[in-house]
Amino acid sequence: QVQLVESGGGLVQAGGSLRLSCAASGRPLSSYNMGWFRQAPGKEREFVAAISWRGGLIYYVDSVKGRFTISRDNAKNTVYLQMNSLKPEDTAVYYCAADSRFYRTLRREIDDYDYWGQGTQVTVSS
């Protein structure tokens, strides 16, 4: 079983940048495809980005393409989400998640991920 801890959230003005980190412990991160999700107040949790276990395959939701970059460093057991050109509508709690079935294609559904972090708050002011 893997434990995930997100960090790097905070308050930033529109147009600014943040880099979120998701540190894993308990098992090597290389055993998992990884995803980032977010949940805004009053809304359902939604997919943001995913990266395959070796980093060779990446998906983004259309609303963040060109602004967000997901990456991973398996040697450091960490996944990152670099967020640039932030908008107020990016305000949410951001969660990282691990899919243990790394041999299959990347997933965008919440139920396809086995392990979740506690989340980190990102607030973008206008």
Image (cartoon, grey):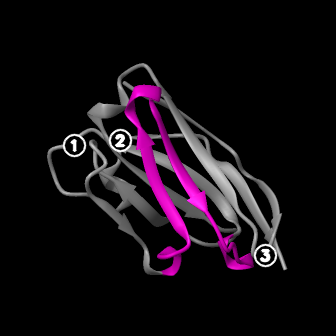
Give left or right: position of 19 versus 100.
right
Q: Disc 1 vs disc 2: which is toward the camera?
A: 1
Q: Amino acid at mark 3?
A: Ala
Q: Residue at x 43, y 62 (%)?
A: 49
Callout 2: 10 Å neighbours few (<14), some, many (20+)?
Answer: some
Q: Disc 3 vs disc 2: which is toward the camera?
A: 3
Q: Are the residues flagged by discs 3 and 1 in contact, CB closer than 8 Å?
A: no
| Pointer 3 or 1: first along the chain | 3
| Disc sitting over residue 102 in the figure | 1
Numbered disc 3: secondary structure: loop
- Regarding residue 3, the answer to whether it shows in the image is yes
Q: Is residue 68 above or below residue 62?
A: above
Picture quarter containing residue 18? bottom right
> Could you tell me how far apart the alpha carbons at marks 1 and 2 are, in whole angstroms?
11 Å
Residue 71 within the segment the image draws in magenta: yes
Q: Is residue 14 above or below residue 3?
A: below
Callout 1: 10 Å neighbours few (<14), some, many (20+)?
Answer: some
Callout 3: 10 Å neighbours few (<14), some, many (20+)?
Answer: some
Identify the residue position indicated by label 3 in the image. Answer: 14
Q: Amino acid at mark 2?
A: Asp
Q: Residue 66: x and y, percent? A: 50, 76
Q: Residue 21: x and y, percent? A: 58, 43
Q: What range of the chain is rendered magenta?
A: 63-90
The residue positioned farthest toward the left in the image shown: 103
Q: Residue 64: x and y, percent? A: 52, 74
